[in-house]
Amino acid sequence: MLSSSRTGKDRPVQKRATLIYFATVILVIVIVAVTGLHAAGISLATLTQQNTATPAATYILPKVTPLFADSFASDASGWNLQSAPGNYQVAVGNGALTIGIDKNKLLWEPLPGSISYGDFTLVVNAILAKGDQNNGYGLYIRGAAGRDSDLDTYYRFELYGDASYAIFKGIVDQSGRSVATKIVNYTLSSAIQKQGKLNHIVLIARGASLSFIVNNQLLKTFTDSSYATGSIALFASNLPEAKPGIQVQFSQLALYPMQMSKPS
C-alpha cells in the first residue's frame, strides 16, 4: 500500500497551514505599524493628505514705493465711508476696513482716487469676521462701471466661509445687462482658512495673465485679454443663499507696480 505522503494527498493541508501562518505574521506587522503611528500622533489619512498638499507659490515683493497702501489706522486715504442703518456699513479704524451688510446683497468699496490700474501686485489680509459658509468676500480688479455706476465688466476673485473660492468675469450681454460668468467654479481648497480666520491674499496682474494666491499657495493662474485696465475694489457678498448679516475686515493693503517674478 502506498503511503499518503507519496501520493501527495497531505500537501493541500500543508499549503493551507503555511498560508495561514504567513497571513498571521503580516496581520501582526500591520497592527504593530498602525499602533506605532497612532502613538506618534500620525494617521494614515494625514500621510495621504501630506502627499496631495497644494505646492507653495514663490514670489518676492518688490522693494519699491507702492502705488497705494493703507494700514487702516485712520481714514487718511479718503475711503467712501457710508452707512445705512439696518442695511450696510463701511468703516475704517483699528487697523481694518470693515464692510458690514445686514441684508442680502453685494457691497463693493473702490480704492480712493478713481484711478485705473493695469499691471500690478496687490497684497491684502482679509477675514470673514461674521457670517456663514455661503458668505463671500474678496477683490474686483480691472473693473469698469456702467450707466448705473455699478461695475459691469471686471474680474472678481472671491473667497467663501467654507474655505472655497471662485473667480468671475463680468460681461455685458446683448440686452446691455451685466452678467457674472465663471472662470473658476466653486472649488474647495486646503489653502483657504474658514470663517473667523485670517487669509493672506495676493493678486498678480501681468498683461493677460492673472494669478490668485492665498496663504502662499497658488490657487489659479489664467489668461484673459478682455480687460487691460480698470478700477480695484474690496467687497463683501451676502447673497440670497446666505443668512442675512456679514462682516468682513480687510487689513494691511498694498498695491505695487509690476516688478515681481511670476509665481511658481
Image (spheres, grey):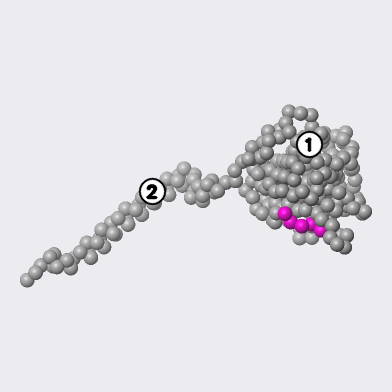
- 181, above or below 201, in the image: below
Which residue of the protein is positioned furthest toward the bottom in this rendering? 1
Which residue of the protein is positioned furthest toward the right in this rendering? 147
Bounds of the magenta segment:
179-183
Q: Is residue 180 magenta?
A: yes
Q: Residue at x 43, y 49 (%)?
A: 34
Residue under pointer 2: 32
| First along the sequence among labels 2 and 1 | 2
**Position in image of residue 228 (x %, y %):** 80, 45
Type of the residue with mark 1: Leu
Residue under pointer 1: 255
Q: Is residue 83 magenta?
A: no
Relative side of 36 to 8, left or right: right
Camera-near label (2 vs 1) is: 1
Q: Residue at x 84, y 44 (%)?
A: 231
Type of the residue with mark 2: Val
Bin the neighbour count of mark 2 within 10 Å (Cα to Cα): few under 14, some 14-19, many 20 and up. Answer: few
Find numbered disc 2 in the image and state the secondary structure of the residue it sits on: helix
